[in-house]
């Protein structure tokens, strides 16, 4: 699945199994999806779309500034 950096728009493909594992181990705030650090700028990478193990859905549109271009 696709992860996108909120700062530099870098995209990275992360296997769904990996994300799921993070999600399950995380056990924290279900309103926040598993997030990774960008390899380029160290920013937060957010899933383009992800449905979590608890049924929560996350979209990049939810956290992206709507005023950007
Ligand atoms: Zn970045």
Image: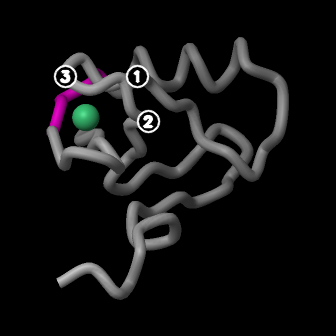
Instruction: Tell whether 30 sits left or right of 46.
Output: right
- The relative height of residue 66 versus residue 55 in the rendered view (above or below) is below
Tell me the CA gap for discs 2 and 3: 11 Å
The image shows a total of numbered marks equal to 3
Instruction: Check residue 14 for magenta coloring.
Output: yes
The crowding category of the residue bearing disc 2, from other C-alpha atoms within 10 Å (few below 14, some 14 to 19, many at least 20), is some
* Rendered location of residue 7, percent (x, y): 31, 47
* Rendered location of residue 23, percent (x, y): 63, 26
Secondary element at image label 2: strand
Secondary element at image label 3: loop
**Where is mark 1, residue-wise?**
37
- Towards the viewer: 46 or 20: 46
Instruction: Tell whether 27 sits left or right of 61.
Output: right
Region of the chain picked out in magenta, as a range: 11-15
Report whether the residue tagged 3 is closer than 8 Å to ligand 1: yes
**Where is mark 3, residue-wise?**
40
């Amino acid at each position: 699945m696709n992860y996108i950096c909120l700062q530099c728009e870098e995209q990275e493909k992360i296997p769904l199994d990996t994300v799921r594992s993070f999600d399950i181990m995380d056990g924290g705030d279900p309103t926040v999806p598993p997030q990774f650090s960008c390899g380029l700028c160290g920013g937060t990478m957010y899933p383009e779309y992800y449905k979590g193990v608890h049924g929560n859905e996350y979209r990049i549109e939810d956290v992206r500034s709507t005023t950007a271009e």
